[in-house]
Amino acid sequence: MINMAEASQILASDETIKVMEILKRYSSDKDNLIPILQEIQKNVGYLSPDFVRLVSKHLKISASSVYGVATFYTMFKFAKPAKHNIKVCLGTSCHVKGGDRILETFERLLEVRCGESSRDLMFSLERVACLGSCALAPVVVIDDTIYGNMHVDRIKPILSKIRG
């Protein structure tokens, strides 16, 4: 079990305290890895390198083993969540209608790559295999708003409106 002093050396924050509280509820049985990761993801929103180290010490397994499991599942995020989440569909219909250019434009304008958040933590960007709105292709979802028939010319005005 990891003590709070050890945890504070890694990262002194409210997030670390939440992670430590989660770890206290689980034994050091390796079978607890996925439930621990799920609970951290649910309560903190992402798995930082520091959180991975805490989990690996708690379960007495290597950090690379923790990453190996966590990277296998798409539900786990490794960047601090941003205020607004952008999902760009790259399913067949969206791809054929320019989804890749839309994704590249978001990356350029936000100065991020897929799976990352902007420096100001205003936007996170991810690619998805299908949003189930093929008739509206290409599709982008920002938070809970669906933008169908998306075109690269619409991206700047949408981002400006969201930024306020």
Image (cartoon, rainbow, N blue to C red):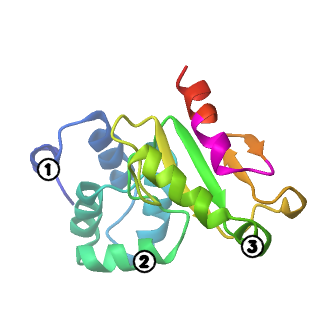
Q: Nearer the viewer, residue 67 or 34?
A: 67
Residue 2 in picture, x, y percent from top left = 18, 56
Secondary structure beneath label 2: helix
Q: What residue does disc 2 label?
A: 69
The residue lying at 80 percent from left, 49 percent from top is 148
Is the residue marked by circle 2 packed among few (<14), some (14-19), or many (20+) residues within 10 Å? Answer: few
Looking at the picture, does residue 63 appear above or below residue 126?
Answer: below
Dividing the picture into quarters, in which one does residue 54 lie?
A: bottom left
- Whole-angstrom CA distance, mark 2 to mark 3, is 33 Å
- Whole-angstrom CA distance, mark 1 to mark 3, is 46 Å
89 is within the stretch colored magenta: no
The three-letter code of the residue at mark 2 reads Val
Q: Quadrant of the C terminus?
A: top right
Looking at marks 2 and 3 on the same chain, the residue that comes earlier in the sequence is marked by: 2
The three-letter code of the residue at mark 1 reads Ile
Secondary structure beneath label 3: helix
Q: What residue does disc 3 label?
A: 96
Dividing the picture into quarters, in which one does residue 85 lie?
A: top right
The residue lying at 18 percent from left, 38 percent from top is 12
Residue 18 in picture, x, y percent from top left = 35, 41
- Whole-angstrom CA distance, mark 1 to mark 2, is 22 Å
- Of marks 2 and 3, the one in the foreground: 3
Region in magenta: 148-156
Secondary structure beneath label 1: helix
Residue 61 in picture, x, y percent from top left = 25, 77
The three-letter code of the residue at mark 3 reads Val
Q: What residue does disc 1 label?
A: 10
45 on left or right of 143: left
Residue 117 in picture, x, y percent from top left = 41, 47
